[in-house]
Image (tube, helix red, strand yellow):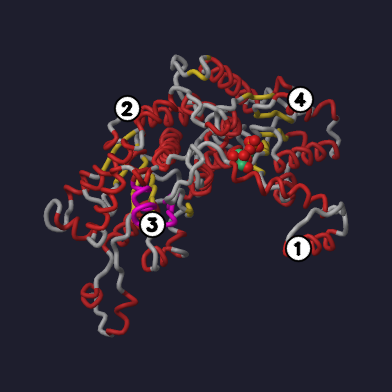
């Protein structure tokens, strides 16, 4: 039980002792007047091309010692080795968890159930390289011999959020689609709301469109509905059924279902049950990335992930970026009791990173029972939210600065802009750093008065308490390698927190009940017999059934 660990109790006492101290004072005390240089240096880490400044957290050196001790007492090193060793740490699904193998060198010795996995991983990578080169080079054509200009990835959750986020983040690479270039435009459709698919297909030429049906299980309702509708879209526009193979490829672990759908198994890109959906962008789920950006960019992404894996596996816990970040999250969630955390990337290119992180953290660690089925008895995943800066500043930062609850923020900032106009990037970075500084320092009544405010009644409104924590992560730029390291950083941070809470971060049973209940409701909406529902649900179904006119929709 995490709450029974010795370090947990010590941290509770320590929290009581320091919770009223102010970051502003710590900065003033440590390292000379107002500079805090010793604090800034002590609480900064560099790894895999990323810099993490965690000095603006409500911590002392003792806090970090205790948090590391908690990680040790929770068995982090042992659990980390179990993951890298291919043990079935996803016990409720009886599966290994080995996404780290996807970005490892060919001679890495990863095994699952005594069998080496690297040959399979690199076979699939070689097929992805060849296929992406053929499509991008114009050698793979549609049924009428025309080159492919548009790729549609049909997938949801882990089969969508990761590749969608990466393609968005790296759209500035010179190898990405440009007007008149040869790289195809890549579109993502996830929702079963037909609007998304209809709007995407509306602008496309079926002769020049390639579809990736991306689903680990190949049974997911949304993806299969979109796949069947897209198939019909081709047929309705005169593509012969016998030629559909030129327009459909699959990414899946389920060969039988791929075959049953009518996709040639030769055009299936395999992955394995030891890859969780939300950890799968490094696998053939990244096929859309190779098509959008070229295989070399994908290889760079893998290299960045590998850099972070190496750091996570070998760095001492107190200098280990995913461990430090993970334990800071535990500090706020469990000792300060903070229910949410904000991801604020100061890069429009990274605007989808918060959505990616929501699945990664909340699907992984949104659990209430421990690995043995007993209650956790403490809080687990916070609500993760955020948008790209500086937009958030003009929306919800008011609440983060002066609201009644504290929201820890992770600022992520590339030091060089992916692209942009002269003068913008300094403004962007200035705002990022200013937000973190303002959250930390606040503004005292004296400072408000010194700024010329004489109306005492206004002072409470203009006061900022400060002492609001944040991390700042700097990337050299939004490069494929730095992005790979950033994603792997958050993957491992999620793992670290799951270890402390003693939960299985790799299953997702909580998504099943709603899926189950949707089936009979859909039958009822189509005019079929009714299942037993509560009065609220029955009334909603009746209203929708009337609107749909029995069987439409
Ligand atoms: O519903 C949750 C989930 O199982 C996710 O974990 C997964 O990423 C997503 O659905 C998609 O699953 P699949 O790749 O099997 O279609």
The residue pinned by badge 4 equals 259
- Whichever of labels 2 and 1 marks the residue nearer the N terminus, that label is 2
The residue pinned by badge 1 equals 540
Identity of the residue drawn at 21% across and 44% down: 41
Identity of the residue drawn at 27% across and 36% down: 319
Q: Is residue 267 left or right of residue 105?
A: right
The residue pinned by badge 2 equals 314
Q: Separation of disc 2 and disc 4 at Cα?
A: 43 Å
Identity of the residue drawn at 29% across and 35% down: 317
Q: Are marks 2 and 4 in contact (CB under 8 Å)?
A: no
Q: Is residue 261 left or right of residue 286?
A: right
Q: Which residues are magenta?
A: 328-347
Q: Separation of disc 3 and disc 4 at Cα?
A: 50 Å
Q: Separation of disc 2 and disc 1 at Cα?
A: 55 Å
Eye-nearest disc, 2 or 3: 3
Q: Is residue 199 left or right of residue 406?
A: right
On the image, the x and y values in percent for residue 537 come to 73, 61
Residue 218 seen anywhere in this rendered image of the structure: yes
Q: Residues within 10 Å of mark 2 (few under 14, many from 20)?
A: few
Q: Is residue 535 left or right of residue 90?
A: right
Q: Residues within 10 Å of mark 4 (few under 14, many from 20)?
A: some
- Whichever of labels 2 and 3 marks the residue nearer the N terminus, that label is 2
Residue 46 within the segment the image draws in magenta = no
- Whichever of labels 1 and 4 marks the residue nearer the N terminus, that label is 4
Dot 1: what SS?
A: helix
Identity of the residue drawn at 42% across and 63% down: 397
């Amino acid at each position: 039980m995490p709450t029974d660990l010795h370090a947990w109790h010590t941290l509770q006492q320590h929290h009581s002792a320091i919770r009223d101290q102010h970051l502003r004072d710590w900065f003033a005390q440590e390292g000379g007047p107002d500079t805090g240089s010793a604090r800034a240096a002590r609480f900064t880490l560099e790894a895999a091309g990323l810099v993490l400044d965690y000095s603006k957290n409500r911590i002392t050196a003792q806090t970090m010692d205790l948090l590391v001790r908690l990680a040790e007492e929770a068995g982090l090193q042992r659990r980390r080795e179990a993951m890298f060793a291919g043990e079935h740490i996803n016990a409720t699904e009886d599966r290994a968890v080995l996404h780290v193998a996807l970005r490892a060198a060919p001679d890495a010795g990863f095994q699952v159930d005594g069998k080496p996995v690297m040959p399979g991983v690199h076979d699939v990578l070689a097929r992805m390289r060849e296929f992406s080169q053929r499509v991008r080079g114009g050698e793979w054509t549609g049924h009428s011999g025309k080159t492919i200009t548009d790729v549609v990835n049909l997938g949801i959750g882990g089969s969508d959020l990761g590749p969608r986020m990466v393609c968005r983040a790296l759209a500035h690479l010179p190898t990405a689609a440009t007007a008149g270039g040869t790289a195809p435009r890549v579109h993502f459709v996830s929702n079963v709301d037909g609007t998304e698919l209809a709007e995407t297909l509306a602008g496309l030429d079926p002769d020049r469109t390639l579809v990736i049906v991306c689903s680990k299980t190949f049974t997911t309702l949304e993806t299969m509905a979109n796949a069947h509708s897209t198939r019909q879209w081709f047929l309705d526009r005169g593509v012969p059924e016998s030629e559909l193979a030129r327009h459909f490829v699959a990414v899946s672990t389920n060969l039988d279902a791929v075959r049953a759908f009518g996709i040639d198994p030769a055009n299936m890109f395999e992955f394995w049950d030891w890859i969780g959906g939300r950890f799968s962008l490094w696998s053939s789920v990244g096929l859309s990335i190779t098509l959008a950006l070229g295989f070399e960019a994908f290889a760079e992404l893998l290299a960045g992930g590998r850099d972070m894996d190496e750091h996570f596996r070998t760095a001492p816990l107190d200098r280990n970026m995913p461990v430090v970040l993970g334990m800071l999250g535990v500090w706020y969630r469990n000792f300060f009791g903070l229910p949410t955390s904000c991801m604020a990337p100061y890069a429009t290119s990274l605007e989808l990173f918060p959505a990616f992180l929501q699945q990664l953290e909340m699907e992984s660690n949104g659990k209430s029972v421990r690995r043995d089925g007993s209650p956790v008895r403490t809080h687990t995943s916070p609500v993760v939210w955020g948008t790209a800066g500086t937009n958030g500043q003009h929306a919800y930062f008011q609440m983060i600065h002066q609201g009644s609850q504290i929201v820890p923020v992770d600022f992520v900032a590339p030091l060089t802009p992916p692209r942009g106009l002269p003068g913008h990037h300094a403004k962007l970075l200035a705002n990022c750093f200013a937000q973190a500084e303002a959250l930390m320092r606040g503004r005292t009544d004296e400072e408000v008065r010194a700024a010329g405010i004489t109306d005492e009644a206004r002072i409470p409104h203009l006061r900022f308490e400060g002492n609001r924590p944040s991390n700042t992560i700097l990337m050299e730029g939004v490069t494929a390698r730095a992005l790979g390291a950033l994603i792997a950083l958050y993957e491992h941070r999620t793992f670290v927190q799951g270890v402390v809470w003693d939960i299985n971060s790799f299953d997702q049973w909580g998504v099943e009940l709603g899926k189950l209940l949707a089936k009979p409701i859909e039958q009822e909406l189509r005019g079929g017999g009714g299942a037993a529902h509560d009065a609220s649900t029955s009334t909603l179904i009746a209203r929708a059934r009337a609107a749909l006119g029995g069987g439409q929709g």
